[in-house]
Amino acid sequence: MKINFVVTISLIFGMLSSCNSKAENKSTSDDKNLIIDMHTLSNYQDLPILNTHLELSVNFKEKKLKGSVTHRLDDHRKVDILKLDTKYLKIDSIQDGNGNKLEFSFGKFDELLGSALSIILNTQSNEVVIFYETTDKSEALDWLLPNQTAGKTFPFMYTQGQSIFTRSWIPIQDTPGIRITYSAKINTPQNMMAVMSAANPQEIDTNNVYSFKMNQPIPPYLIALAVGNLEFKAINFRTGVYAEPSMVKECANELIDMGRMVDVAEQLYGKYDWERYDVIVLPPSFPFGGMENPRLTFATPTIIAGDRSLVSLIAHELAHSWSGNLVTNATWNDFWLNEGFTVYFERRIMEALYGRDYSEMLALLGFQDLQNQVDNSKPAMQLLRLNMKGKHPDDAMTDIAYEKGYFFLRMLEEHIGRDKMDKFLKTYFNDHKFQTIVTDEFLSYLKENLLDDNYRGLNVEQWVYDSGIPKNCPKVNSIRFKNVESSVATFLDGKAQDLKVISNKWSTHEWLHFLKHLPESLNLDQMVDLDKVFDLSNSGNSEILAVWFLQCIKNDYRPAFENLDKFLVKIGRRKFLQPLYLELSKNKEHKIWAKKVYQKARNNYHYVSFNTIDNIIN
Ligand code: BES
Ligand code: ZN
């Protein structure tokens, strides 16, 4: 079986590379049809897992999860080897559902993908039970000491599965190409609550055992666990917030609109299929802004700004409950189907709740990000449908997937009209719910259900398979941003004080636009002036801080470096860290400074972040 599978795959890839006569970044018709996930070593196509049950105890002292996972397979399997993905796991023993020992072996270790675990199924049973533990190399896991939490008393741990990290905490077919239901029993230390991407507890269990069930089938990258001294606060009947006790009130207050967000999302694209929608606000090491774990979005505390100005992130993660979690990219090459759709949906939620003016600011910031991305990346990485073979799928997380994806859908909307577009999307989600999809399937569906003869003039193929931004990319006009741009001129001609009155009414997004629109270099007086009048170096808004600090580094504005140091040590969100460390590494002195800071900070970062920063700083 092993040989057959490998041979089949290499034959397909062999065929692809030999008939790929066009430029590297162009796809041939063959690989457009490719629906095989190249980021798994499992035999998920021959023998997909149907259900998974976890029994794990959380050991903070040894920083490991230990226990078992039981996978249920089809009763009528055609092959007798089960191949799972693993990376840095210690497998103790494997049994069938009746307790009979099963033989297993590991394939060659691959730095990117880990090693295949092959289990020989000489049994009638359709279950395998794997006894295992995680190791200190398990990339999904972040173990925090009490002093890395808000409360400073209890440790904390959480997992990050997307894109290919689930295999480092569960031996599983770690591919978005399958869907499983799951259940779990998690043992924790005293006074700690476990929560998962499943039906969750709302109180600490005095017996320290938590049981979970996820009845809707999900891809394995969405299995998630967090354990800490947590408290729950309801927002409405189906939404609420988990956070450490000292923060939970503040978090719930910040995210007060969550209930309305779910209502608005349902009105747009159909019923919310996951019962509850809760958010857990994690400690600051969390490497992403948000992660759409079903029923329980994982979020960075850096969105808690005090003025509810960064809640579009919640709209985004909520939107994934349709685009991504209900309809899932079948391979990481099709990542834009998850993220581009989600950004479109996110901005529709924001528009419905806070008005077009507001969502257009978000769209324009997005467009600028897209332009920067296009200016700074290789043509092969500028396609919506990517070829990530041999690369880490996380590297597909660029503004191409997000913003080019968004503008593609917006282009369709503007061409076809909003009513038709909304009906189309609603039907698309419904027709594909609890299924996976690749780009080509989507394009066929689009042709059949929305565009018909209109298809030709829209450059659809160019949007998806070519680099750059197509000519028919929608234009975003924001009067609020136009005003900000004239304020930049006012400042450059005068003083920061001249902006005091105007900027009083600015939202975070106007501030971001202002800071991003300042010229590349400002003199020391101008930096001092801005900082003095607006106290930017002490902003309580992480987005503003990150953009301001970037200016500070570019202009060698030393008075801000102490706060920059604190920011880099405390916050583990890669989106903030990466540009800051990159900018710091451009100048010799700054780089020496950055190395020192990084020595203190690295321990506070999740693997996702320190792996990225290691490559910048070393
Ligand atoms: N699913 C992503 C996070 C992700 C992508 C994790 C790729 C691992 C690999 C999540 O929905 C996301 O897009 N988060 C963004 C926030 C959003 C508002 C653009 C983030 O974390 O910055
Ligand atoms: Zn997303």
Image (cartoon, rainbow, N blue to C red):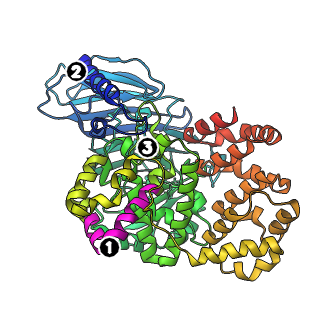
Q: Is residue 465 left or right of residue 286?
A: left
Give the total number of marks visible in the rendering.
3
What's the CA distance linking mark 3 and mark 1? 34 Å
Quarter of the image with the C terminus is: top right
Q: Quadrant of residue 246?
A: bottom right
Kindly check if marks 3 and 1 are in contact, taking CB atoms under 8 A apart as contact: no
Segment tinted magenta in the rendering: 404-426
Mark 3: amino acid: Gln
The residue under label 2 is which amino acid type?
Answer: Asn
User: Quadrant of residue 318 in the image?
Assistant: bottom left
Of 20 and 371, the residue lying toward us: 20
Tag 3 residue: 162
Measuring from the top left, give residue 413's x and y in whole percent: 35, 68
Earlier in the chain: of badge 3 and badge 1, it is 3
Q: Toward the viewer: 272 or 556?
A: 556
Q: Quadrant of ligand 2?
A: bottom left
Respond yes or no on whether mark 3 lies under 8 Å from ligand 1.
yes
- Whole-percent x, y for residue 44 in the image: 26, 33
- Disc 2: which residue: 100
Badge 2 residue CB within 8 Å of ligand 1: no
User: Which residue corresponds to mark 1?
Assistant: 417
Q: Which numbered marker is on residue 508? A: none
The quadrant of the picture occupied by the N terminus is top left
Task: State whether residue 267 appears in this view.
Answer: yes
Q: CA distance from mark 1 to mark 2?
A: 61 Å
Helix, strand, or loop for circle 2? loop
Q: Is residue 397 left or right of residue 334?
A: right
Residue at 46% over, 71% down: 350
Is 559 magenta? The answer is no
Amino acid type of the residue tagged 1 in the rendering? Gly
